[in-house]
Amino acid sequence: MGEEISNKQVILNNIVKTSVKESDMSLRTSKIQLKIPSGCDGAVLVKNLYLSIDPFIINRMRPLEGYYIASYTLDSPISGYGVSKVLDSTHPNFKTGELVWGFTGWEEYSLIKDPILLFKAPDKDLPLSYYTGILGMPGMTAYAGFFEVCSPKKGETVYVSSASGAIGQLVGQFAKTAGCYVVGSAGSKEKSAVALMKVDLLKNKFGFDEAFNYKEEQDYNVALKRYFPDGIDIYFDNVGGKMLEAVLSNMRLHGRVALCGMISQYSLEQHEGIHNLFNHLITKRIRMEGFFVSNYYDLYPKFLEMVVPLIKEEKITYIEDIAEGIESAPRALVGLYSGRNVGKQVVVVARE
Ligand SMILES: NC(=O)c1ccc[n+]([C@@H]2O[C@H](COP(=O)([O-])OP(=O)(O)OC[C@H]3O[C@@H](n4cnc5c(N)ncnc54)[C@H](OP(=O)(O)O)[C@@H]3O)[C@@H](O)[C@H]2O)c1
């Protein structure tokens, strides 16, 4: 029997039908043994260090038909990506003391009985929190979505929505390394410092050629024509909805659209539709493809080979929005759906 200690957890209180509120989650303290119970083979017991706060979490807070991953159970800890330290292991691939990233719980310690989505976090020279972002799932999503789904060519025009976020900031920088012209959009409800900061970051920190605050635009079609007078070759879609519809009417012949996510739809009970697909997709022979990062993890070593030198040579940069303490996780999650985060939203549970 190992030492029994207290374990703070963030649990789901109720099914979330539309937008998520902080009161849909609560903090609870339970107990956990710091040793894997006997007979529990192939498991790891971890101390969670960083939680990755991701938009898909809301989709698991309700029953969603056809969704690729199970909904959360009420009164149980929320789960998602994180960075953790292995305290005990009965799994042949993981040793005590190792640092890992992948699926874990929103709690201080987790017993992961079936660690199918757990990777080693080998690079000690880079910030450990990067495994929630540029070196983890969002990095792989940007890489797979841009290079594998969109097949970019030098000189092509690229548009990225939610461009200052965890994934968008990387897609824009990858597009520049591929020799493309890239425009990003980001926004905030009012003309706040945050909104200015996001658009400014896109142009002056991440090297986008142009950037705009989509919340200040009356007509997305007009905005897109301003930045893409000759049309868009590649659209990396993080938001869906009206923006996707406007982009489709501005695509060039043989353009590619990577459907990464649709955050503008996640809090709506009735999802918006896209009109006029005949004119947009058929006549211009556009390829529009949805993808999941989980189908591309076999490329993770190849991705690291590309991205780690780019970070170390300061050819690529990464912005994180760090919230301190597991107590801050509900607020951090709610903030994603109104654009409160600037860069990758991370919650620090412990610093080793
Ligand atoms: N396909 C996959 O495998 C995969 C994997 C991970 C994530 N995703 C998806 O990728 C997208 C980006 O994820 P991320 O982790 O990089 O998130 P993120 O961009 O870091 O954070 C979410 C951002 O979405 C924007 N947003 C919120 N509500 C919006 C609305 N109604 N309309 C337009 N924009 C809105 C906000 O930025 P603004 O200030 O710009 O509004 C907010 O900061 C999400 O749709 C997510 O579900 C897909």
Image (cartoon, rainbow, N blue to C red):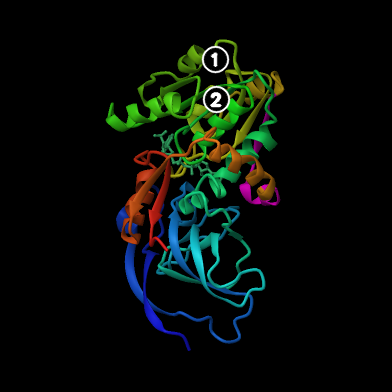
Quarter in which the C terminus is drawn: bottom left
Residue type at mark 1: give it. Phe
Q: Nearer the viewer, residue 102 or 257?
A: 102
Is residue 238 in view? no
Q: Secondary structure at mark 2?
A: strand
Image: magenta residue range: 286-299
Relative height, residue 24 to residue 115 (above, below)? above
From the image, tell me which residue sits under label 1: 228
Residue type at mark 2: give it. Tyr
Apparent side of residue 197 relative to residue 269 in the rendered image (left or right): left
From the image, tell me which residue sits under label 2: 159
Q: Is residue 291 magenta?
A: yes
Tags 2 and 1 in contact by the CB under 8 Å rule? Answer: yes
Q: Is mark 2 within 8 Å of ligand 1?
A: no
Q: Earlier in the sequence, mark 2 or mark 1?
A: 2
Q: Residue at x 31, y 54 (%)?
A: 22
Apparent side of residue 111 relative to residue 302 in the rendered image (left or right): left
**Mark 2 neighbour density, 10 Å: few (under 14) some (14–19) many (20 or more):** many
**Mark 1 neighbour density, 10 Å: few (under 14) some (14–19) many (20 or more):** many
